[in-house]
Image (cartoon, helix red, strand yellow):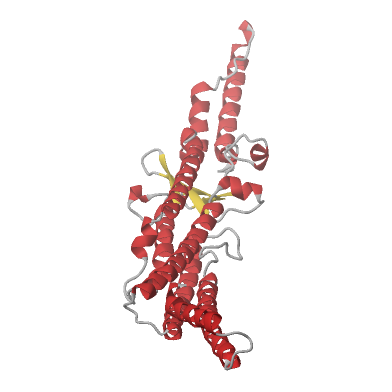
Amino acid sequence: RPLVANELKDINLFLERGTSELNWKSMGINEFVNEASSMVKGVEHVLLTLKDNVVKIQVLLDGFTKSMVERTDAGCCEIEMLQESVETVLNERSDTFIDAGDQIHQIVQASNKTVRTNKAAPTWKDYVSYLNSIVMNKLVEIVANSLRRLSQLIDADYIKQNDMSPLIQISLELEMLSNEGGNVIFTPDLNSLNQRLNLRDFIVNWMCEFHKFPSSMKRLCTGSGDYTIELEGRIELRDLVEDVIMLVGSNEESCEEFAGTFRKYEDLWTLDLQQSFAEWWEEHAVVPEVAVDEGDEAEGAEAESVAKDETEEDLEALNKLKVPPLAAFCLLYTSDAADEEDSVDLGGRRIIKKKKNSYTTEKYEM
């Protein structure tokens, strides 16, 4: 309304003259009515144009409110595949968002021409500030939608409630050291403790990209600069970022708890089972004593020798026995155990396999 305040004032003055000086039988009444109608229609045209331009701006920005991170067609996937998917979406939207930003600036220019006012006028600055708030709220919605969806996709409770497979595949590798003991290694790393590319850095980087995405649009109020500072300062976005970080931390704790099972029973996958059993047998095996008559000492000695030979043959056969290398390992996690909640189940299957001199268990986690 302030943009057409002068026009409304002129209409009021014109109508007051008519009501005080004219009646329906006065000469020139038709011309008066036509002129008054033309003035009202002119103001109506301006107001409708401004209103339509606001709607156009909102529609343009609505096209970018869909989340920038989403599940791939493959379901649970490796982090590199998901990273490629996110980058593709960001690149495509960045290009189209630049065009949308240019169109929004053109719409604002068209509005200025419609109202025919100086851009330095306070009324026009107030109007641009109003448009600026509309754009800002839409940009917040764009970023917030991506942050909310990311939270859902890494929330174990949400995944379970919606019968979804987890978002990211994490592999757990059991590395046997040359001297003794072993390491439990996650691929990718869960965090930056090992100073390698890790899952937490990927997710934090995605959130940064969500905030940077709108920066390709110049501010309406100045025609330069962007909305980065305002976006970073919005409380609702800060709260959503904090939610994501808390979920990442919760997932890390669950993974470490799962790894703790393997650390607790480290001997089962770091020791050579055949060698350990042979050593135990040699230490604890008891050679059976054969009772002999006093007069048959030679025959008893021969029987004792035969029993000893048989025991040694049994031991040799046991040493040659090929014990399945994962037999003991599989006792730590079976599908039945998972059904009975006897093991940590973070929402996916585990595939246990032997890989050179290390064991690997692949599981779907986030």
Q: Residue furthest top?
A: 294
**Relative to the observer, which residue lies in front, 323 or 293?**
323
Q: Is residue 210 left or right of residue 353?
A: left
Q: Is residue 290 left or right of residue 355?
A: right
Quadrant in the rendering for residue 304: top right
Tag count: 0
Q: Residue at x 41, y 69 (%)?
A: 132
**Relative to the observer, which residue lies in front, 307 or 332?**
332
Residue 365's spot in the image, x, y percent? Answer: 54, 49
**Relative to the observer, which residue lies in front, 60 or 358?**
60
Quadrant in the rendering for residue 221: bottom left
**Relative to the observer, which residue lies in front, 43 or 90?**
43
In the depicted structure, whether residue 64 falls above or below residue 259: below
Q: Residue at x 40, y 38 (%)?
A: 181
Residue 28's spot in the image, x, y percent? Answer: 57, 93
Q: Residue at x 39, y 61 (%)?
A: 231
Residue 307's spot in the image, x, y percent? Answer: 60, 23
Is residue 80 visible to us here? no
Is residue 332 visible to us here? yes
